[in-house]
């Protein structure tokens, strides 16, 4: 166990702090973050790239800073920006850009990566469909080749940020006769393409964070495919790998936990501080134990990653546990607030600007999104623990039923 | 920065676990438990040869002078083997108490013998955590009077360390006049707890504990970390056994692990338990390396492992179906070990309350 940072990293942390002290007044005011969407002003992003605090490992020829991957430095940058409450930079899109860099052609890299990194090309993800959620590979939005264009018909759902995005990366069925995993292709195209209709999907929070996207004979150039025809499922798994890493971040959980402690020390009920109520306090302490365990689990995963080792089980459980903990924290914050926990929509008595009410609902969405808790348990059981899959249902019999 | 065990720590873990696998199989545990023995002497002896009892004792006193993390790794292996040995009190808590509060003479007398496994120590300080069915122990004029309940590993002990109500620690000869020792029957037959009645018994105080509660609290902290690590080992075995069983047992022409109802129980056990390993590593490491976090982390490790241990003990038993509750399968040895660790030195609610005080929340 060595929890100390070596001098190289201590110096690096000092550098980041000095940079933030000098420049943080230039940081844009931030609205609530929309995951996957570049949201910092372009100048701020450019400044961060120049110093290596954004797009850090993206090669220079594609608009990045071009550093060797160093997980610890990436972590230090994230920690210091969070500590200074300054919006971090981005790497274009943490799902699309790594996928294109890994699997795209040279032409595609030049076309897609630099503007994404500069914040001039934003992305939405076209994966889920009304009939294909957990069973994503059954998706049915189809693309047929007509001359040198794909003609797309079908519908996507849960498309976050589609109303603002410039581009979509999208899974479509191109080989209807192939087995389901081998009949999918990965296309990229402009959201201005005629035949694309974006309709907001209002959720229980009252906001239209998600959208439905309808395709009616939308025509896309044939070369806007990443990877080969029929290999889209495998291309997408590259992307999913990058997305999953972001859900259930233990550092974020610790920040939220500290905010609940603040509330419970500040707020009173009947003249008694909330933290003086032994039942509330025990719930708080129980959560603290769980959060600490996940924090150290995160350090263990990080150490495996630094050494280039596959972390195995400690990694598989992050999304399941992290999202559940976040939801429980929001639930505790609302419970301790009592009637105040009911307030919403900018009521003058709202605490923390309604953060907890929104989080309680959003975090339930995150337990479901990005692979439901039940799918996570299947994956833990099958991939980490080696338990057998459920027997396949005979397709013909399933149709008949 | 490397959050991982060192090569030496992994070797230590492997050597203890490797020995216990052959030297302390369930059949050996059963022999001791069914005879209501207080310990497996052969296992104790071999652990002596492996240097286990001296893990926390300075080299100057015949120990190997390792840290709390190494002690926790040993505890994990002992929990996994449900080993019937008085490790918690004799190899850990008593040496810590002596090192923190003993006079040079006391250390010179007892630490080498404890390290060599020649002397077994019991520790009675339950009244300092949660007094029940006892008026406690008072010290006056070098004599102790009262009752120490749930004295750990005391049944076979050659020497006792007893806390008096003022928090001072005392060495007591269990053979001395006025001492009576009654082993209590508990669910767990792999460790012992005793009722020690003291009637004007000559005792020798550990001088560093007379006006300073720190030695007592440190002894409790380390004891809690060790119990939590023992639960980690026991709960890991229960999880592994459930997974193994779910891969073999067939019903409805399928192995039961292919049913999501069973698979999800296994996944939940793994998801709850895996972060506990990191929590124990950090806590045990921090106890030596980051003293300002030590007590809080010890509380959380004890409380959290108690909760997760209970969850795993129940779910693993369920995965095993009817066989899970039979003596024949013996899963109950781990179930009860986890239960013992939960109740001793402060059940989770009580320890969490202490964590609140440590953080000045109350």
Image (cartoon, coloured by chain):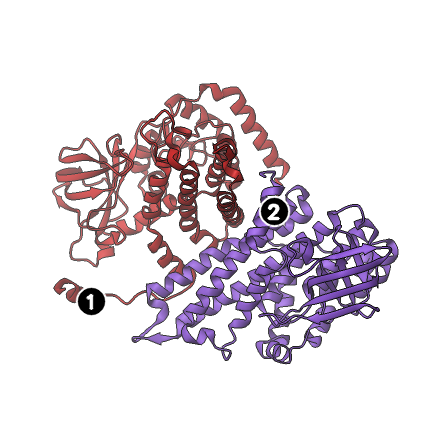
Say whether residue A8 is left or right of residue B317: right
The answer to whether one can see residue A312 in this image is: no
* Residue A358: image location, x then y, percent: 35, 35
Q: Is residue B160 above or below residue A218?
A: below
* Disc number for residue A394: 1
* Residue A35: image location, x then y, percent: 35, 36
The colour applied to the residues of chain B in this rendering is: purple
Q: Is residue B178 above or below residue A187?
A: below
- Image quadrant in which the C terminus of chain A is located: bottom left
Count residues near mark 1 (Cα–Cα under 10 Å), then give few for <14, some for 14-19, many for 20+.
Answer: few
Q: Which residue occupies the foreground of this view, A74 or B59?
A: B59
**Cβ atoms under marks 2 and 1 closer than 8 Å:** no
Q: Residue at x 56, y 54 (%)?
A: B348
Number of dots carrying numbers: 2
Q: CA distance from mark 2 to mark 1?
A: 57 Å
Q: Secondary structure at mark 2?
A: helix
Q: Which residue occupies the foreground of this view, B287 or B356?
A: B356
* Disc number for residue B312: none
Query: What residue is pinned by disc 2?
Result: B354
* Residue A293: image location, x then y, percent: 52, 49
Say whether residue A83 is left or right of residue A327: right
The answer to whether marks 2 and 1 sit on the same chain is no
């Amino acid at each position: 166990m060595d929890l100390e940072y070596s001098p190289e990293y201590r110096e690096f942390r000092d550098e980041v702090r000095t940079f933030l002290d000098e420049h943080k007044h230039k940081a844009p005011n931030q609205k609530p973050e929309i995951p996957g969407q570049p949201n910092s002003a372009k100048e701020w992003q450019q400044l961060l790239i120049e110093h290596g605090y954004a797009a850090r490992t993206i090669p220079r020829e594609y608009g990045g800073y071009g550093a060797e991957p160093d997980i610890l430095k990436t972590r230090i940058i994230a920690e210091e920006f969070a500590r200074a409450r300054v919006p971090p930079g981005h790497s274009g899109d943490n799902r699309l850009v790594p996928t294109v860099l890994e699997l795209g052609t040279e032409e595609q890299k030049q076309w897609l990566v630099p503007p994404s990194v500069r914040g001039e090309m934003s992305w939405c993800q076209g994966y889920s469909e009304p009939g294909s959620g957990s069973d994503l590979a059954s998706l049915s939005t189809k693309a047929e080749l007509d001359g040198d264009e794909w003609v797309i018909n079908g519908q996507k759902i849960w498309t976050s940020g589609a109303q603002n995005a410039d581009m979509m990366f999208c899974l479509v069925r191109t080989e209807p006769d192939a087995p389901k995993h081998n009949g999918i292709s990965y296309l990229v195209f402009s959201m201005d393409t005629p035949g694309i209709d974006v309709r907001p999907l209002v959720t229980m929070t009252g906001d239209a964070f998600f959208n439905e996207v309808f395709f009616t004979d939308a025509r896309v150039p044939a070369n806007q495919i990443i990877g080969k025809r029929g290999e889209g499922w495998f291309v997408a798994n590259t992307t999913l790998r990058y997305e999953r890493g972001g859900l259930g971040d233990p550092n974020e959980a610790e920040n939220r936990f500290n905010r609940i402690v603040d509330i419970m020390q500040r707020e009173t009920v009947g003249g008694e501080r909330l933290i003086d109520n032994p039942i509330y306090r025990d719930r708080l302490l129980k959560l603290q134990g769980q959060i600490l365990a996940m924090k150290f689990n995160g350090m263990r995963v990080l150490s495996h990653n630094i050494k280039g080792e596959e972390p195995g089980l400690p990694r598989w459980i992050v999304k399941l546990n992290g999202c559940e903990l976040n939801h429980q924290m929001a639930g505790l914050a609302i419970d301790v607030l009592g009637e105040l926990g009911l307030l919403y929509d900018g009521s003058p008595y709202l605490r923390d600007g309604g953060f907890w009410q929104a989080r309680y609902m959003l975090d339930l969405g995150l337990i479901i999104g990005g692979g439901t808790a039940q799918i996570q348990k299947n994956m833990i059981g099958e991939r980490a623990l080696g338990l057998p899959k459920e027997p396949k249902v005979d397709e013909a019999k399933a149709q008949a039923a | 920065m490397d959050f991982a065990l060192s090569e030496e720590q992994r070797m230590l873990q492997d050597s203890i676990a490797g020995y216990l696998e052959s030297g302390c199989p369930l059949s050996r545990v059963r022999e001791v438990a069914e005879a209501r023995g207080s310990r497996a002497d052969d296992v104790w002896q071999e652990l002596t040869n492996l240097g286990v009892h001296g893990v926390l004792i300075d080299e100057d006193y015949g120990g190997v002078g390792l840290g709390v993390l190494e002690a926790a790794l040993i505890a994990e292996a002992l929990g996994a083997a449900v080993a019937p040995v008085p490790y918690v009190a004799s190899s850990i808590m008593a040496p810590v108490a002596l090192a923190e509060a003993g006079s040079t003479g006391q250390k010179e007398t007892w630490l080498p013998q404890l390290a060599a496994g020649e002397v077994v120590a019991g520790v009675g300080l339950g009244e300092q955590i949660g007094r029940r069915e006892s008026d406690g122990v008072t010290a006056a004029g070098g004599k102790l009077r009262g009752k120490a309940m749930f004295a750990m590993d005391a049944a076979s002990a050659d020497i006792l360390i007893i806390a008096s109500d003022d928090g001072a620690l005392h060495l007591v000869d269990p053979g001395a006049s006025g001492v009576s020792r009654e082993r209590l029957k508990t669910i767990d037959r792999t460790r012992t707890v005793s009722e020690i009645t003291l009637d004007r018994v000559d005792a020798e105080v550990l001088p560093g504990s007379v006006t300073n509660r720190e030695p007592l609290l440190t002894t409790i902290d380390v004891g809690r970390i060790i119990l939590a690590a023992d639960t980690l080992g026991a709960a890991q075995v229960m999880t592994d056994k459930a997974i193994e069983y779910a891969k073999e047992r067939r019903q409805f022409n399928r192995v039961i692990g292919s049913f999501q109802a069973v698979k999800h129980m296994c996944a939940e056990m793994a998801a709850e338990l895996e972060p506990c390993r990191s929590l124990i590593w950090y806590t045990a490491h921090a106890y030596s390396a980051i003293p300002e976090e030590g007590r809080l982390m010890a509380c959380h490790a004890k409380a959290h492992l108690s909760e997760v241990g209970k969850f795993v003990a129940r779910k693993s038993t369920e995965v095993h179906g009817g066989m899970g509750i039979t003596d024949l399968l013996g899963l109950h040895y781990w179930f009860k070990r986890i239960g013992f660790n939960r109740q001793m030195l402060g059940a989770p609610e009580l320890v969490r309350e202490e964590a609140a005080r440590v953080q000045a929340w109350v």
